[in-house]
Image: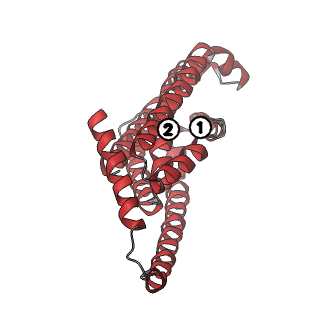
Amino acid sequence: GRHHLDRFAGRHADRADRMSVSAPGDQGSQQGPAAGHLDHSIARNTTLMLLGRVVYVAGWTLIAPFMIQRLGAERFGLWSLLTVISGLYLTFDLGLSSALTKFVAEFRVAQNAEALRAVFTRGAILYGAISAVFALLVIACRDPLLALFRIPPTLHAEAAGALVAAGIGYGALNLFMLVSSVLSGLHRIDLWNRISMGVTFAQLAGVFVVLACGGGVRALVINTTVTLLLGSMVAWAVI
């Protein structure tokens, strides 16, 4: 809410202010500790980023045979197609995530709480607009998309429902990317990687439960959406 947004902006502006203050004549003595802290931060972020990639790749690779066994080749292909579309979807954010990271970092260093609040609000509005447009396009064009991807007639009903769920789910993906950009701008990549790994574990656990209970592709998409929303809520709570 607005109260949380105000608290977020003020807290990080104050934190940047405290980091920038140093007593006269102390700059030389602080260069060593500052450099050591930076080296430690880079090493920590790199390690967590690498660990996050390993967890993601290894987790989905290990669960893939179980998914194929439960879904069958055609439905697994449909799931893979939706996953590919989500990856392509992320490339059409028009550079918004990079711009948001840049401005959050700049305004934090400048200790400008009002600008921090404004850039977050505008980023949320733009991401929301992109999500709404994309979801409406997917819902409106689901039949031509099914024909384009040559979905078998036996899977048309399930594929149509999964496409609609995916169109809505991409909005959750946008929210996830929004908080990712903010945390990157705040130099909390370590925290973001921890949250991402938690989301990955939650998604994998959800996939197992959904398929063990006889769920299909639409249920898997809903599982992805729910875990992304939970990850975004955790990130927002700790920002």
Q: Which residue is mark 1?
A: 86
Picture layout, residue 28 above or below residue 182: below
Residue 76 lies in quadrant: top right
Could you tell which of marks 1 and 2 lies nearer the N-terminus? 1
Q: Which residue is mark 2?
A: 173
Residue 72 lies in quadrant: top right
Query: In the displayed structure, does residue 29 sit left or right of residue 90?
Result: left
Query: In the displayed structure, does residue 234 sit left or right of residue 33?
Result: left
Q: Amino acid at mark 2?
A: Leu
Q: Amino acid at mark 1?
A: Ser
Front position in the image: 151 or 161: 161
Residue that protrudes farthest toward the left in the picture: 3
Residue 202 percent coordinates (x, y) = 38, 49
Q: Tell me, for residue 223, which label it has, or none.
A: none
Front position in the image: 168 or 216: 168
CB contact under 8 Å: marks 1 and 2: yes
Q: Residue at x 70, y 19 (%)?
A: 147
Tell me the element at label 2: helix
The tally of labels here is 2
Residue 63 percent coordinates (x, y) = 49, 53
Residue 48 percent coordinates (x, y) = 48, 67
- The reply to whether residue 233 is visible in this rendering is yes
Picture layout, residue 15 above or below residue 46: above
The crowd level at tag 1 (other Cα within 10 Å; few <14, some 14-19, many 20+) is some
